[in-house]
Amino acid sequence: MARYTGSACRLCRRLGMKLFLKGERCYKEKCAIERRNYAPGQHGQKNRKVVGYALQLQEKQKIRNYYALMEKQFRRTFERAQNMKGVTGENLLSLLERRLDNVVFQLGFASSRSQARQLVRHGHIQIDGRKVNIPSFEVRVGHAVVLREKSRTNAVILSNLESAGGRGIPSWLEMDRTEYAGKVVAVPSREDMKLPFQEQLVVELYSK
């Protein structure tokens, strides 16, 4: 499957915001956008006004890269959101938030979404007692996301759980660290997600 293999920090600098693609590094002073808060390249420090189509495209790229999706995956998710009842932009973010790889990251098992995707692919995660190795799996209300028993001594995962305490867990999730299990208790609303995106610009972009 195709995936982005370039510099993660370059994406953050290009889009002008932290996308939290490098795990713990993003929360420290070593973060590239903290040290060089301008676009990469020879002309990166020039002030450029972004308006109209360019602004819509930039917002789409922010959301797509934040969740580490390729264009085809993102477009497919948007089309699902469009066919659901309610506000399309909010539906889109709700579907993206409930992807299994994002839920695994939010629960603290992984330090980044790319690492969460790897944990899911390698069979470390179970849903209601069954192994699920599909990162795009839609986690629904009532689903229990559990770290399989053999993985509970994994040093990387334990370190992630320890350091994730300061990051906090969204209100639509519950976490029982003693059981290495999380649960989706509600469909996330726009207020619950607290994401710095203007999703309506993405709707406008795809409506052209």
Image: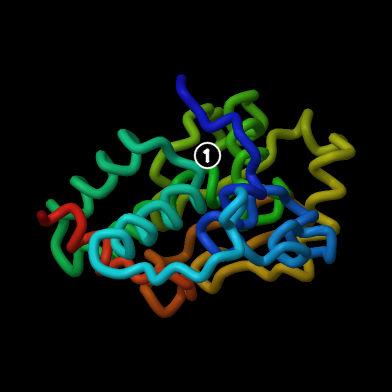
Assign the C terminus to one quadrant of the image.
bottom left
Frontmost residue, 89 versus 159? 89
Which residue is rendered at x = 21% and y = 61% of the image? 203
Residue drawn at x 47%, y 30% is: 134
> Can you name the residue that lies furthest to the bottom here?
191
Residue type for callout 1: Ile
Q: Residues within 10 Å of mark 1 (few under 14, many from 20)?
A: many
Residue position for label 1: 127
What residue is rendered at 70% in x and 54% in y?
Answer: 108
Relative to 173, say whether 42 is above or below: above
Query: Relative to the observer, which residue lies in front, 164 or 131?
Result: 164
Where's residue 149, x and y in %? 75, 34
Q: Nearer the viewer, residue 77 or 38?
A: 38
The part of the image, by quadrant, that contains residue 117 is top right
Give the percent coordinates (x, y) of residue 18: 61, 62
Quick one: 110 or 31, which is closer to the camera? 31
Outermost residue, top side: 1
Q: Above or below — where is 11 with respect to 47? A: above
